Image: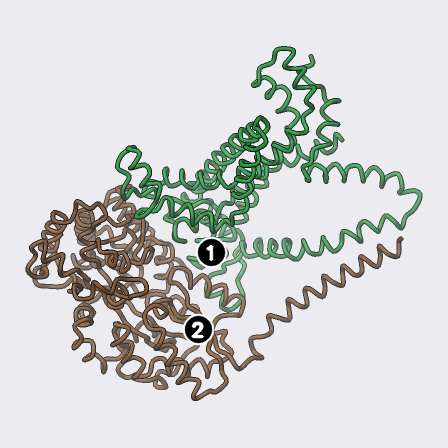
Chain colours: A brown, B green
Amino acid sequence: MRLRILAAAIAAVALAVAASTAAGGTSARGSAAATKITVWLQNDAQTGWPEIVAAATKAFQAKHPGVDVDVQYQTWGTHLTKLDAALAGGDAPDVIEMGNTEMTKYMAAGAFRQLTRSNYPNAKTWLQGLADSCTFNGKTYGVPYYAGARAVIYRKDMYRKAGIKKTPTSLAQFNADGKKLIKRFGKDRNFSALYFPGKYWYASMSFVYDYGGRIAVLKGGKWQGALNSKASLAGLNALAATVKAQSRANKTGDEANPQQALVFAKGKVASFIGNGWEWPYALDPKVGNPALAPAVGAYPMPSHVKGRFMPSFLGGSDLAIPITSQQVALAADWIKAFTSTESERNLATQGKVIANTTTLAAINASNPQLAPFARAAKFSWFVPTTPNWANVENADVLQNMLVSIFTGRASVQKAANSASSQITRILNAGS
Amino acid sequence: MRLRPGSEELAPVSARFPAATTATVAGTALHSRRRRRSWHRRALPVAAPYALLLPTAGVIAAVLGYPLYLLVKLSFQKYGLFELVRHKGHYIGTANYARILHDSQFWTVLGRTVLFTAVNVALTLVLGTAIALLLVRLGRFMRVVLTTGLVLVWATPVVVAVDLWRWMVDYEFGVANWTLTKLHFGNFLHHDWFANPWTGFGVITALIVWGAIPFVTITVYAGLSQVPQELIEAAQIDGATSLGVFREITLPLLKPIFVILASLSIIWDFQVFNQIWIMLDERPTSDYFLMSIYSFVESFRISEYGLGSAIAVVMVLFMLGITFVYVRQMVRIGEVQ
């Protein structure tokens, strides 16, 4: 009896030890397998240009036969959380797509490998805005992937029916047209003249910059939140008035849940502010409505100053190699294949985004589906370039402010004050 | 006199309750008495229970103790993204704690969490017990129907349940808005339940209470079936109303069960995370921060892992504080037996 208990105890202990060593064994796999690289791309690529990804992998595999490329699609909302966890666990991917606003924080923390810029295709002609987002202290840590600017994507037929003869050239005209649209179609409670979800901060900040406002300014080496400056408040007030008059979108929702292009495809939205790729996405036969194709057009969002555009957010993505990657050479080669001239040309023509090099700018200008976005991209704004900026984004400071304004939880002034002081605190946090 | 059963009556009845925790506690108490007796006779068997406990203790130490140790260690460190990449933080004493305690947001969130927990626990226990009492009185068929419904709710995975509820209160296509409008409660088309945090938390509370009721109901129902029918009949003969019977007989007899249910509910509701996180598209605005979400956002969104850990430690201590009273009472109930 006693013996049996002892034996059972020993067996249990042995089992526990075995289990823990087995767990240890799995974590050692990274360095051994040189036959696979892991790539994290955003789901924009999955919905917009999966065949370009496949073509890049094919070109890469022609050079490296037998090397598997595991492309895993991520979402913007959670990919940094996953990256942090993966960096801590030493299990990060070999190539990662980063939003251009997210780069600085990670470059400053030393999370990415330094790259030799001249090794990559079109390095001399990269778009300046994107190349800047890949550079920290004069060193390169990323490769521009594509850029995007937003414009008003609209229904020509609805505009016509509402008696609008040409697209507006000022914000006042834009709002007057909105009124006509609401008058003509607004009986349907699902109709929006401009579909504008409450947390859509990229489009919102364009109003702020249009009125000469800023998110934050650098004063004597210190950042200061500037959303409550006079000019910023004018922009926020214009935004609040525009959204209130024209939009019946969810005030606490964002532009990706549901995808605004798909709401547009349902036919009860006359316009929304979207990226170039959202136009074809709305017409996608699988998820959108191809029948709308002849009725869709785009124009840059007009400024409050007649004849000008509102500055558009210069969005974009870069590709980087996390510091934990064991396959740096292979990762670099995959990036080269994916950002080759041919691949970038396809991104512009099929993906409807702005290619990473100025040598392909002609493609954008000559395509009616791209020209409004390319024009919008020329006049753009960008977030404050400091390592702490990503924390402002991640803490949803701007989204919280916008939701407060749109739902009436706080006055514009009060919401802007609160957001400004938070931004000041976060941007100046010791690092 | 018969309406108030003395403690001599209470003890044997509650010993028969099926609740596992009480049984374990009782078992431990019994066991310790036996061990004391055998101590003089044989020394070797004393080691056997400990040897048997060893694997369990080892597993607990590995999966609970070590992470807890890391959490506490992190909370005394500056550990941002820079440190994360290098796998090395540096000790900064209690600076993280000082920062939290001086942050007004922390106190707001703490207050909100306490209120949220209190409301959810109260609703869960009251409604759960009411349904259990209903179950006792129902006919066989309806009882099976109701129990099946409860078990189905219980069996629904959290993520699925949250998605169901999210669709019901959806801004564009939600059935809640549609139904309320059709029933002429007003114009609920495009009503945003989350624009106002009070109605938003109303939806979340409904979801959480809905999910927690089956466990409470089924446990209380099991307890009710153990209440001796003679006691109730005697009380009724003495002229007690059903409310009187419940207050004077059922409630005292089921007290151990309620203590356990309350403490478990407090622990669960105090650390609610998934429901809010998924319901609000993984980006809740700060009005919806409860402690768990606040800690997560500070850690994983702002990459202030030290600070986030400190919040988590405070949260654990706070929860220990609340549940201590209950745990002590639970152990006492065990000791009586």
Looking at the rendered structure, the kind of residue marked 2 is Val
Where residue B33 sits, quadrant-wise, is: top right
Residue depicted at x 7% and y 61%: A166
* Between marks 1 and 2 in the image, the one whose residue lies nearer the viewer: 2
* Viewer-side residue, B171 vs A417: B171
Residue depicted at x 42% and y 60%: A78
Q: Is residue A7 left or right of residue B235?
A: right
Q: Is residue A160 above or below residue A122?
A: above
Q: Which structural element holds mark 2?
A: strand
Residue A416, x across and y down, in percent = 26, 49
Q: Name the residue at the bottom extreme.
A: A63
Distance in Å between CA atoms under marks 1 and 2: 27 Å
Looking at the rendered structure, the kind of residue marked 1 is Ser
* Viewer-side residue, A428 vs A265: A265
Where residue A388 sits, quadrant-wise, is: bottom left
* Viewer-side residue, B2 vs A108: B2
Where residue A187 sits, quadrant-wise, is: top left
Q: Is residue A254 above or below residue A415?
A: below
Kindly identify which residue carries mark 2.
Answer: A71
Q: Are marks 1 and 2 in contact (CB under 8 Å)?
A: no
Q: Name the residue at the front extreme.
A: B141
Q: Is residue A155 left or right of residue A54?
A: left
Q: Is residue A89 above or below residue B291?
A: below
Kindly identify which residue carries mark 1.
Answer: B299
Q: Is residue A267 left or right of residue B145?
A: left
Residue depicted at x 47% and y 47%: B161
Label 2: chain letter: A
Q: Quadrant of the C terminus of chain A?
A: bottom left
Count residues near mark 2 (Cα–Cα under 10 Å), then give few for <14, some for 14-19, many for 20+: some
Residue B303, x across and y down, in percent = 44, 59
